[in-house]
Amino acid sequence: MLLSKKEHLRMAEPMGTIGERKRKDFNPINVTTKKGRWSNWEKEMFLRGLRQFGKGKWKQIQKMIPTRTTIQVKTHAQLVLKRIADGEDIFAR
């Protein structure tokens, strides 16, 4: 019986819940993840990443900001993109 690519990849995944794998895989160099307000450096790196990679490339942008998770980057992007939609020039800073 032939397996689809998706089934084959699922069988090759390590055991454990998806959440456990994400927590382990997120930070291979053990940089601590921050919570709360974004620092000026993090905001600047986010904007650079947004310029460089564009909307929707949250994983690549996250690699520029090791103190934040991909989900945090995506959530931050929602706020920034709303400000852009409201007419604010976020790149003018």
Image: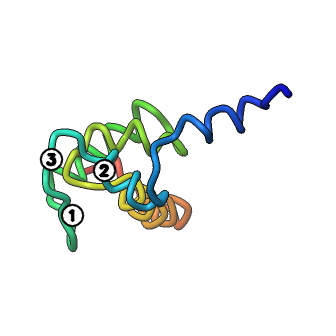
Front one among 23 and 88: 23
Q: What quarter of the picture does the N terminus occupy?
A: top right
Distance between mark 1 and mark 3 Cα atoms:
19 Å
57 sits to left or right of 76: right
- Give the SS element for disc 3: loop
Q: Which amino acid does label 3 sit on?
A: Asn
Q: Which of marks 2 and 3 is nearer the N terminus?
A: 2
Residue 4, image x, y percentages? 78, 31
Q: Locate residue 29: give its quadrant.
A: top left
Distance between mark 2 and mark 3 Cα atoms:
9 Å
Residue at image x 51%, y 40%? 13
Q: Name the residue under label 2.
A: 24
Structural crowding at the residue carrying mark 1, measured as other residues with C-alpha within 10 Å and reported as few (<14), some (14–19) or many (≥20): some
Q: What residue type is labelled 2?
A: Lys
Front one among 42 and 20: 20
11 sits to left or right of 62: right
Q: Locate residue 20: give its quadrant.
A: bottom left
> Is the residue under label 3 in contact with that under label 2 (CB below 8 Å)?
no
Structural crowding at the residue carrying mark 2, measured as other residues with C-alpha within 10 Å and reported as few (<14), some (14–19) or many (≥20): few
Residue 83, image x, y percentages? 46, 65
Q: Residue 30 carries which label?
A: 3
Residue 22, image x, y percentages? 40, 53
Front one among 4 and 62: 4
Q: Residue 38 carries which label?
A: 1
Q: Earlier in the sequence, mark 1 or mark 3?
A: 3
- Give the SS element for disc 2: helix
Q: Residue furthest top?
A: 2
Residue at image x 53%, y 44%? 55
Q: Which residue lies furthest to the front in this view?
A: 1
35 vs 77: above or below: below
